[in-house]
Image: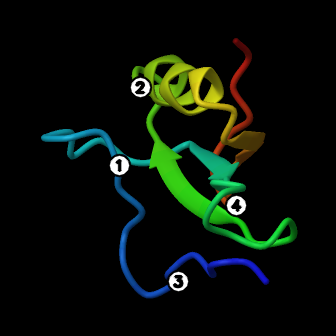
Amino acid sequence: MSDPLPTDEPLICSSRGCRAPARWALRWNNPRLHDADRRKTWLACAEHRSTLGDFLDARGFLREVVPVAGSPTLEG
């Protein structure tokens, strides 16, 4: 099961206070709380991709990072 991304609203970065358009979907789960196939999604702009990803990765939660549909693929 995965959490669908809203399609009728602009996709905004999940970083606190950021209102930039999302370019990346950080797909994650907490194995202590979620089934193995469950994915939660945080959205990230180019500036916050690494900080949000590092936060999730340090806890062992990050599963994948994918470009948001309709956004250009960014390197880095």
Residue occupied by mark 1 = 14
Q: Earlier in the sequence, mark 3 or mark 4?
A: 3
- Are there few (<14), some (14-19), or many (20+) residues within 10 Å of tag 3? few
Q: Amino acid at mark 2?
A: His
From the viewer's perspective, tell me whether residue 31 is left or right of residue 17: right
Q: Amino acid at mark 3?
A: Thr
Q: CA distance from mark 1 to mark 4?
A: 16 Å
Q: CA distance from mark 3 to mark 4?
A: 10 Å
Placement of 29 over or under 2, stated as above or below = above
- Residues 63 and 6: in front is 63
Q: CA distance from mark 4 to mark 2?
A: 18 Å
- Are there few (<14), some (14-19), or many (20+) residues within 10 Å of tag 2? many
Q: In this rendering, which labeled residue sits more in front, label 4 or label 2?
A: 2
Q: Quadrant of residue 33?
A: bottom right
Q: Amino acid at mark 4?
A: Ala
Residue occupied by mark 4 = 69
Q: CA distance from mark 3 to mark 2?
A: 21 Å
Residue occupied by mark 3 = 7
SS for tag 4? Answer: loop
Residue 58 spot, x, y in % from top left: 59, 21
Q: Amino acid at mark 1?
A: Ser
Q: In this rendering, which labeled residue sits more in front, label 3 or label 2?
A: 2
Placement of 29 over or under 46, stated as above or below = below
Q: Earlier in the sequence, mark 3 or mark 1?
A: 3
Residue 27 spot, x, y in % from top left: 68, 52
